Image (spheres, rainbow, N blue to C red):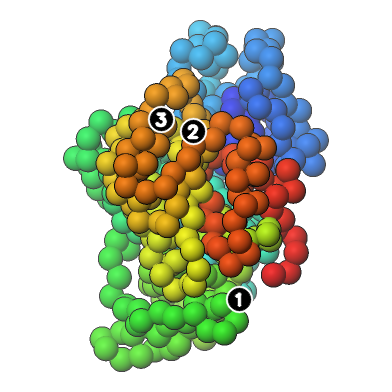
């Protein structure tokens, strides 16, 4: 049995890849500075926060997250020993080779939801698909599903050009926005990478021929709209998910599933049974009306704001910036979109791979304060005290790609388990 050592093993994608490798018969262990991962504990995969060079010696293959550069001690040591080293996206592509049809969904926004929708439709249609996501399905409470080998649906991340390792049967590009400029440097380089991704697939869906009608929420809170082809209605949809942006995501999923021959009846049934993924305008229980959303880019926050237009009450943006570089690159855009909410609450930046620089979030705070009531918190307990001061009819929109939702859940401020 071969031994694979994962560096950054507790990341949402890396942990699922580690479990997949273990189920394929490999011996798996790994390193992570934050070694708490429920999935890995459940699978009895050992994780350490110590730099164990002896394990690098023993391993047959090293897989590392793009959050680590090649100068990281474990990686540089592995390369000095001429170990086989694969970055996360390269390992994902290596695993994808065992599937007949790979469907890879890329884009600045919406890729997790589109991939999850495609998976759900194929599952309802009896195709026994497998799935890899960067988010958790609500129904399965997991970000990966290992079923048959006919279809593999995966989210394809553009960061560090990870998606270029994939050679999918069908690729999807939901949109291209200025993002990850710490790596790409400029928008032109980003667009070139997406063009290469498109050319890596046998068929790419980067625009839709179907159109969605005007959306509205019914009395059950479902998102309702009609789908048209050449101005002819093909069916009405009533989705369990709330975000208005799910309308466009559903259209991409329909296009893909029609391309591979799924009957319309299964497409409609699959979409209407789709329960969504976590942190995508996810309604959770607390004193006020509270929604979690992964929005961490100005365009994504704007999509949340657009959905908020359909709900009544005060709109309070509770935002945790994700990386200092993103805040710097899009400072004016963040200020503009956040200032459109009735009130703004900022929580300390989730730095991810970057060094702390509190001057960045303080500048964001001061610029928003010129336009809107705003406060900045570094202490979770003080933040919760502030959030508890809002009325029951107020809407708290908790946004960001960091750890704030998990912190609020651990503190029992929010709860996902109650029927609301």
- Of the two numbered discs 3 and 1 on the same chain, state the one appearing first in sequence: 1
Q: Are marks 3 and 1 in contact (CB under 8 Å)?
A: no
Q: Secondary structure at mark 3?
A: helix
Q: Residues within 10 Å of mark 3 (few under 14, many from 20)?
A: some
Q: Residues within 10 Å of mark 1 (few under 14, many from 20)?
A: some
Q: Quadrant of the N terminus?
A: top right
- The residue singled out by tag 2 in the image is 349
| Residue lying at 54% horizontally and 78% vertically, measured from the top left | 222
Q: Say whether residue 60 is left or right of residue 398.
A: right
- What is the spatial separation of the Cα atoms under label 2 and label 3, in whole angstroms? 10 Å
Above or below for 397 versus 352: below
Quadrant housing residue 248? bottom left
| Residue lying at 57% horizontally and 14% vertically, measured from the top left | 74
- The residue singled out by tag 1 in the image is 273
Q: Secondary structure at mark 1?
A: helix
The residue positioned farthest toward the left in the image shown: 188
- What is the spatial separation of the Cα atoms under label 3 and label 1, in whole angstroms? 43 Å
Q: Say whether residue 14 is left or right of residue 353.
A: right
Q: Are marks 2 and 1 in contact (CB under 8 Å)?
A: no
Quadrant housing residue 14? top right
Query: x, y (%) of residue 72?
Result: 51, 14
- The residue singled out by tag 3 in the image is 362
- Of the two numbered discs 2 and 3 on the same chain, state the one appearing first in sequence: 2
Q: Is residue 72 visible?
A: yes
Query: x, y (%) of residue 2?
Result: 68, 28
Quadrant housing residue 410? top right
Q: Is residue 249 visible?
A: no
């Amino acid at each position: 049995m071969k031994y694979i050592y994962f560096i950054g093993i507790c990341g949402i994608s890396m942990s699922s890849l580690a479990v997949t490798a273990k189920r394929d018969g490999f011996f798996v262990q790994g390193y992570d500075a934050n070694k708490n991962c429920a999935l890995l504990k459940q699978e009895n995969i050992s994780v350490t926060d110590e730099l164990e060079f002896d394990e690098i010696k023993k391993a047959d293959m090293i897989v590392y997250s793009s959050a680590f550069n090649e100068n990281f001690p474990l990686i540089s040591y592995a390369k000095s020993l001429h170990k086989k080293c694969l970055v996360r996206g390269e390992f994902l592509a290596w695993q994808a080779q065992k599937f007949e049809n790979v469907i890879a969904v890329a884009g600045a926004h919406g890729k997790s939801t589109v991939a999850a929708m495609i998976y759900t439709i194929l599952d309802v249609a009896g195709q026994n698909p497998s799935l890899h996501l960067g988010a958790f399905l609500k129904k399965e409470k997991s970000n990966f599903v290992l079923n048959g080998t006919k279809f593999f649906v995966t989210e394809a991340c553009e960061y560090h050009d990870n998606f270029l390792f994939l050679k999918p049967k069908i690729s999807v590009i939901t949109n291209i926005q200025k993002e990850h400029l710490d790596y790409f440097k400029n928008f032109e380089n980003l667009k070139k990478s997406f063009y290469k991704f498109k050319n890596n697939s046998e068929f790419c869906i980067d625009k839709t021929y179907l159109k969605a009608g005007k959306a509205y929420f019914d009395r059950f809170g479902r998102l309702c709209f009609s789908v048209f082809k050449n101005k002819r209605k093909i069916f009405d949809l009533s989705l369990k998910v709330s975000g208005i942006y799910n309308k466009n995501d559903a259209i991409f999923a329909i296009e893909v599933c029609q391309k591979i021959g799924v009957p319309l009846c299964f497409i409609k049934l699959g979409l209407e049974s789709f329960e969504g993924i976590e942190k995508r305008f996810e309604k959770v229980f607390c004193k006020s009306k509270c929604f979690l959303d992964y929005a961490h880019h100005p365009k994504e926050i704007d999509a949340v704001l657009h959905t908020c237009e359909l709900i009544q009450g005060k709109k309070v943006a509770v935002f945790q910036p994700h990386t200092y570089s993103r805040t710097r690159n899009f400072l004016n855009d963040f200020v503009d979109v956040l200032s459109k909410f009735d009130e703004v609450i900022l929580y300390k930046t989730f730095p991810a791979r970057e060094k702390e620089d509190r001057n960045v979030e303080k500048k964001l705070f001061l610029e928003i304060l010129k336009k809107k009531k705003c406060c900045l918190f570094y202490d979770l307990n003080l933040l919760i005290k502030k959030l508890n001061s809002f009325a029951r009819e107020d809407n708290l929109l908790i946004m960001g790609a960091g750890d704030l939702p998990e912190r609020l859940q651990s503190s029992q401020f929010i709860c996902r388990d109650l029927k609301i």
